[in-house]
Amino acid sequence: MFDLTGRVALVTGGSRGLGRAVVLDLCRDCAAVGFTYERNEAAAAAVLEEARAINGHVDTFRARVEDRDEMAAVFESLASRYAPIDLLVNNAGVNLASPLISMDIDAWNHGLAVNLTGTFVCSQLAARGMMRKGSGSIVNLSSISGMRGQPGQASYSATKAGMIGLTKSMAWELAPFGITVNALAPGWIEAGMAQAMPEKKRKRALERVAANRFGDPREVAAAVRYLAADESRYVTGQVLVMDGGIP
């Protein structure tokens, strides 16, 4: 069930957190997996070593998702080495928390470029190859912040909401070509910002979660696998919320 044998996958922002979990999960049966990173070369090298212990066909690329030329080179490299990708996971993102009235315009633009423009650029590049093959899956890592908003998260919430709108539009356009496009909206997951949360804030956050725990990155990876598998071919244009039951 949810077998991805033979697929070629690309995960953006795969050097840590949710991206790392997705990369390692896809390595279990995909024919080849590529992942991008922007700055942390040491973290990317560690994930690459771990991934190649599972699957020998894993490549990493230093590239900015918002840069069309850099990402086009990534897609071309994977296509020439293996085949045009079957699965794109748009995971790369930044969260530049700041109150609305004091947010710097450069920080706003950077969040927009990475989270939203990056998703558009990578999806457009992926879609062209998938349309020729008549199949494929795109999974966008949004957030519950894009559905409910959060204080101090104007840039992050706006871009994650934009990803949901983009997901739904792409789903309509690409469905005739056998391509599914869906979004995941995780809540608190034991990765990145949640792990660095002060204990008092963490306790308050847990009080709002019906499951009384934060999610595991591997649970997000399992959801990506479901949305990429043949069993979900009739699921497209949807947002799968993974928040442990926040009311």
Image: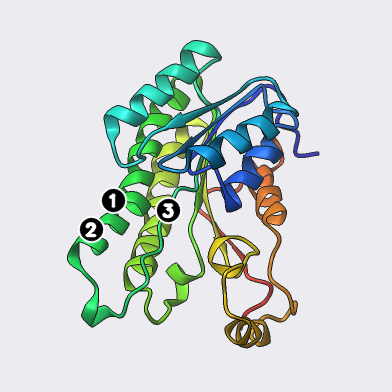
Name the amino acid type tagged 2. Answer: Asn
Mark 1 surroundings: few (<14), some (14-19) or many (≥20) residues within 10 A: many
Name the amino acid type tagged 3. Answer: Gly
Q: Secondary structure at mark 3?
A: loop
Residue bearing the label numbered 1: 113
Name the foreground residue: 10 vs 56: 56
Residue bearing the label numbered 2: 109
| Residue for point 43% across, 58% down | 164
Q: CA distance from mark 2 to mark 3?
A: 13 Å
Q: Tell me: 214 left or right of 143.
A: right
Observer able to see residue 229: no
Q: CA distance from mark 3 to mark 1?
A: 9 Å
- From the image, which quarter does the N terminus lie in? top right
Q: Tell me: 153 left or right of 35.
A: left
| Marks 3 and 1 in Cβ contact (< 8 Å) | no
Observer able to see residue 3: yes
Q: Which mark is residue 93?
A: 3
Name the foreground residue: 247 vs 236: 247
Which residue sits furthest left? 105
| Residue for point 68% across, 43% down | 225
